[in-house]
Image (tube, rainbow, N blue to C red):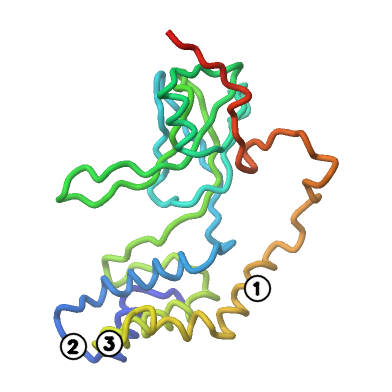
Amino acid sequence: MSLTLMHLVDAFTSILGEDHDARWDDATLCNQAGQYLFDMHEWQWRKRPSVTITLGAGQTYADLPGDLDHIISVQAANNSGRDVFLTTSEIIAGFRASSATSVGTSFWTALEYPDQPDSQSPPRGPRLALFPAASAGDQIVVNGRNTWTTLLLPQQVANVPAKMEMLLVELVRAFARSAASPAMTFSEAVEPIEQSSMLRRLKLADAMAQGNLGQMEGGVLSRGRKRGYRGWYDPSADVAIARA
C-alpha cells in the first residue's frame, strides 16, 4: 500500500491519543520522523537520476533542485569541454580572495549553504559554489540523494520505498512516545530503533540492491592521478595566482 500522511497521523495518534496536547502538531512530527529516516543512513534508494544544470555568464554558484540535499558527484556535460573537480568551500573562498585565475578549462565546485534571507523565512537549500565564474552555456551534471518531501495534505504519499514503510511507522510511533512522556527525549525514543535487527536488515538489503559495483578503482597503480569529480581534490597545483 502507499503510506499517506493520514496513515502516519493515525500511527501517531494510536500512541498519543486523539485528544492529546494541541501543542504537538501531528503532521509536523510525522514529517520530522520522515526526515529522520532519510538522515539516519546513506540509503541507496535515495539516489536520484542525474540533473543537468545550465549556467549563465559570470555565475559563481549553481542552484540545486529543491529535492536534492546530498552530493555524490559532479561532472561536466559532454559538450562543455570542462573538467570538474569537487573541493571545499574554504579552498574556493581562498582562490577568490587571492584573485586566482583558472588554468585551462578546469572548474572547481563545493557544496555551500547560503545565509537565511531574513528572520521570517526558512533557510535556503544548499547550492554549489563555482570557481572560476561560469561562461554562458556551461553545463554541469550533478548526481545526489534526494530529501524527504514534506507532506501537507492527508492523501499525500511518503516518498519512501514500500520496504521502508514499517521503519517510518516505527519512527512516527517513537516520536509520539517521546511527545507523550515529558521525561523521554526524542533521542531516547529512537535509540531502540537505531539498535534494532530490523534496521540492520534494511541497511544490508539496501547495500545489496546493486550487487555489482563495476571494476575496482584505486590502489598502487592509480597513484599520482588527479581525483576529479569522484572524490576530493586539492586544485592548488592547477591554479595560477594573478596579483595586481
In the figure, 67 relative to 97: above or below?
below
Q: Residue furthest top?
A: 244
Circle 1 residue:
205
Query: x, y percentage for residue 240?
Result: 56, 16
Q: Examine the image and state in which quarter residue 10 appears.
A: bottom left
* Distance between mark 2 and mark 3 Cα atoms: 8 Å
Q: Compare residues 110 and 3 and report the one nearer the observer.
A: 110
Helix or strand or loop: what does disc 3 sit on?
A: helix
Q: Earlier in the sequence, mark 2 or mark 3?
A: 3
Circle 2 residue:
20
Task: Mark 1: give few (<14), some (14-19) or many (20+) Cα within 10 Å.
Answer: few
Task: Describe residue 2's horizontal placement relative to residue 207 as left or right.
Answer: left
Q: Examine the image and state in which quarter residue 73 appears.
A: top right
Helix or strand or loop: what does disc 2 sit on?
A: loop
Query: x, y percentage for residue 93?
Result: 43, 31
Q: Earlier in the sequence, mark 2 or mark 1?
A: 2
Q: Are marks 2 and 3 in contact (CB under 8 Å)?
A: yes
In the figure, 143 relative to 244: above or below?
below
Point 18% across, 88% down: residue: 20
Point 27% across, 65% down: residue: 152
Circle 3 residue:
13
